[in-house]
Image (cartoon, rainbow, N blue to C red):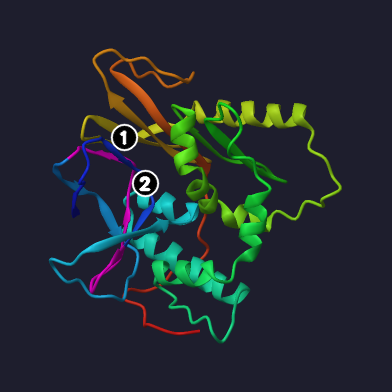
Amino acid sequence: QVNIHINSDKLTFIRGGAMLEGKNSQSRGVQFSTFVAPNENSTLEVLCIHASHGISRGSHFELQGYAPKAIAQNLMRSNQHETWNSVSHFCSSMSQRYSAPEMPIYHDSLVHTSKQLENFRKDVDDALKKIPVDLANQVGVAIFNQKGIVGLEVFDHPASWRALSRSIMRQYSDVIVDDHTPAYLTVDMTKLHDEIHQFLNEAETVEQKARHDISQGYTIIVENKDIIGEYTILKEQNPNPRIDSVIDAPDGHLVHVSLTRNVPVPVTVEYPPPRMSL
């Protein structure tokens, strides 16, 4: 856990997968989405995302974007060992793809690798510019590639989506960049709608794996063999959901739904791994 204090008079929403860069301590990843009450001391449930770095009590943290979905999934499962595995796999694969002498990558430091990639991954910036995220009344997005729907992100209000859309899309950057569909091919919208409905039908079979009670609400972690995700509820005396959902939340307001295909990590590492520069 890490302690957090929000200097605001408004309830603050923090998405799962947020990366907290440790100052003289291990960097951490937030396990699941949560609310932080205004002007109150709260705690965030986190896991380490820099295995070889030591821990220093009383250190401060700084928000540094969001972990890729493959890593966020293991944060969501509260699985420290697989989180380290997925961090190692991501850092190694990125160092091979974008290797450059002026871009040293520590193979177990997610924050460091993510910062370095910001200077080199122009392919991500170019791909993101082509994705509409600010349409009128848009509240979310379905991410797909040649294999079908990869993920679904939905919020309760267009303003919520606009505030977080760019950071969400960056979490799917590997999927977006790796999709090699030729530009001259067009999308069959009828088939795409069918794919979305099939994904939602699969999502109806997810099982609740954990419930996390948070300030003024709760987050539910769900999973089946193909899909993992979370949904976050804000408790209200007079619930008035703004989006339709198969999720029954009689005691609150559905704020956010995130569902993604399970991403296997084909690598295991020992702890603590040696620190390296590639």
Q: Earlier in the sequence, mark 2 or mark 1?
A: 2
Q: Classify 10 Å Cα crowding around label 1: few (below 14), some (14-19), many (20 and above).
A: many
Please provide percent x and percent y for residue 22: 27, 67
Q: Tell me: 89 left or right of 34.
A: right
Asked if labels 1 and 2 touch by Cβ distance under 8 angstroms, the answer is yes
Q: Nearer the viewer, residue 42 or 194?
A: 42
Helix, strand or loop at mark 2: loop
Query: Which span of residues is magenta-colored?
Result: 21-38
* Foreground pick, 21 / 181: 21
**Residue 73's x, y, as percent?**
43, 49
Residue corresponding to mark 2 = 16
**Hey, which quadrant is residue 150 in on the image?**
top right
Would residue 225 be seen by someone viewing this image from the given angle? no
Residue under the image location 23 percent in, 71 percent down: 25
Question: Is residue 30 within the magenta segment?
Answer: yes
Tag 1: residue type? Thr
For residue 14, side relative to residue 69 (left or right): left
* Amino acid type of the residue tagged 2 in the rendering: Gly
Q: Residue at x 31, y 34 (%)?
A: 219
